[in-house]
Image: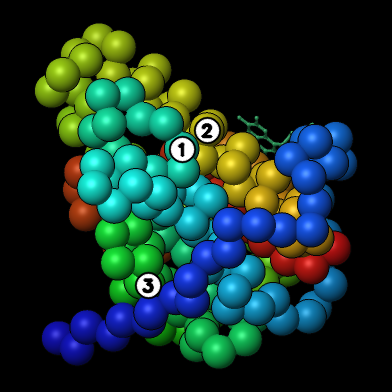
Amino acid sequence: MEMKEYKLSEPVRKGDMSIEEAIANRRSIRTYSEEKIGENDISQLLWAAQGITNEATGFRTAPSAGALYPLEIYVVIAMVEGIEAGLYKYNPASHILILKKKGDIRDDICSVSLWQDSIKNAAAVIIYCAVFKRTFYRYRDRAAQYVYIETGHAAQNVYLQAEALKLGTVAIGAFYNDGVKEVLDLPGEEEPVYLMPIGKK
Ligand SMILES: Cc1cc2nc3c(=O)[nH]c(=O)nc-3n(C[C@H](O)[C@H](O)[C@H](O)COP(=O)(O)O)c2cc1C
């Protein structure tokens, strides 16, 4: 099978908005304009979610219990400059997207997320999935709690990064796990935890 990869541009480490402004102004936004967002926006948002910030240790933008990194990030691309529509998996180590499925699958995700319009109209949708056993091996009965907490860390990074990019997003917990697994054709060990549609305000 052809493995199509897309090298994302280098994320920036400095921006125009202060962290205080991003925190103060962040709001859940559920309707988006029909404009495309930039490839650099996707690069920056995925980096904020789970990018590597220390090459030597592999430590990432968001904290992780025992640095075990149970999260796997997918992105549904629909209206992004320079990236063809499809389902991609984010690879933090090389900051690339790996194509999993071609085409615009927003309606499919929408139909397993209680028909929330925010998904249907997004330029892209970030999907946080988790491999619970990575954390379970060490933390046992604490593992599920740790994985959910960690997803929240990554999602808050994306909320704040989206604000700094003047983009809108909303954290979505209401969806059918089995439905999302089927639409994404997820490996059995990966469980969807959170969705975040992204678009221009
Ligand atoms: C765990 C969790 C699940 C959520 N699920 C949804 C959802 O399914 N759909 C939605 O539109 N918003 C969802 N939200 C967003 C909340 O509705 C939103 O954060 C709340 O109304 C406060 O607004 P604010 O984020 O603008 O401050 C969720 C938020 C959290 C923390």
Using the numbered discs, state the Cα–Cα distance from disc 2 to disc 3 in whole angstroms: 21 Å
Q: Vertical placement of 148 versus 171: above or below?
A: above
The quadrant in which residue 98 appears is bottom left
The amino acid pointed to by label 2 is His
Determine the residue positioned at 38% across, 79% down: 7
Label 3 packing within 10 angstroms: few (<14), some (14-19), many (20+): many
Query: Picture coordinates of residue 132 (x, y %)?
Result: 26, 32
- Look at the image and tell me in which quarter the C terminus lies: bottom right
Question: How is this picture coloured?
Answer: rainbow
Count neighbours of disc 1 (C-alpha within 10 A) and say few if under 14, some if 14 to 19, many if 20 or more. Answer: many
Q: Are marks 1 and 2 in contact (CB under 8 Å)?
A: yes
* Rendered view: 4 above or below 61: below
Q: Position of residue 131 (x, y in %)?
A: 25, 39
What is the number of callouts on the image? 3
The type of residue carrying mark 3 is: Leu
Decide if residue 74 is on the left or right side of residue 144: right
Specify which label sits upstream in the sequence, 1 or 2: 1
Write down which quadrant ligand 1 falls in. top right
The residue that mark 1 highlights is 62
Tell us which disc is closer to us: 3 or 1.
1
Of labels 2 and 3, earlier in sequence is 3
Helix, strand or loop for disc 2: helix
Q: Which residue is mark 3?
A: 97
Q: Which residue is mark 2?
A: 153
